[in-house]
Amino acid sequence: MAMNEPSTIRPFVYTVIEDDSVNVTIEIAEEDYLADLAAGCDEDETMKPGRYVFRRGGFLDRHPEFKNQIRKG
C-alpha cells in the first residue's frame, strides 16, 4: 500500500458487557460485523455477531510448568 492511499484497516469494534477481573464478556454487534465485511475483511478475519466470554490470565493455569520461570519484579 502506498503512503498516500487511505488505510482500509478498520479497528476491532466491540462492547464490554461484563468484566469481573477474571472473566470478560464482550459483544460484537451485527452492524459492526457487517461494517468489517464491507471494509474488506474476510469472514474468518473477524468475529461473528454475538457475545463472547474470555478468561484473563489463564495461561499459567493451562501451563503450570512455566510458573517457576516467572521473575518477580
Image (cartoon, grey):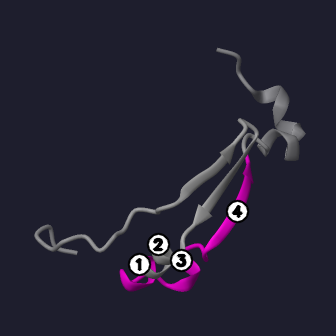
Evaluate if marks 1 and 2 touch, with contact meaning CB atoms under 8 Å apart: yes
Residue for badge 4: 52
Most distant residue in the top direction: 73
Residue for badge 3: 30
Evaluate if marks 2 and 3 touch, with contact meaning CB atoms under 8 Å apart: yes
Kind of residue sitting beneath label 4: Tyr
Distance from the alpha carbon under mark 2 to that under mark 3: 5 Å
Tag 2, which secondary structure?
Answer: helix
Q: Which residue is rendered at x = 47% and y = 76% of the image?
A: 31
Residue for badge 2: 32
**Lower sequence index among marks 4 and 1:** 1
- Which quadrant does the C terminus fall into? top right
Q: Which residue is rendered at x = 29% and y = 74% of the image?
A: 8
Residue for badge 1: 35
**Viewer-proximal residue, 6 or 37?**
37
* Crowd rating for badge 2 (residues with CA inside 10 Å; few <14, some 14–19, many 20+): some
Which residues lie in the magenta part?
36-55
Kind of residue sitting beneath label 1: Ala
Q: Which residue is rendered at x = 38% and y = 85% of the image?
A: 38
Kind of residue sitting beneath label 3: Glu
Distance from the alpha carbon under mark 1 to that under mark 2: 5 Å
Kind of residue sitting beneath label 2: Asp
Question: x, y (%) of residue 65?
Answer: 88, 38
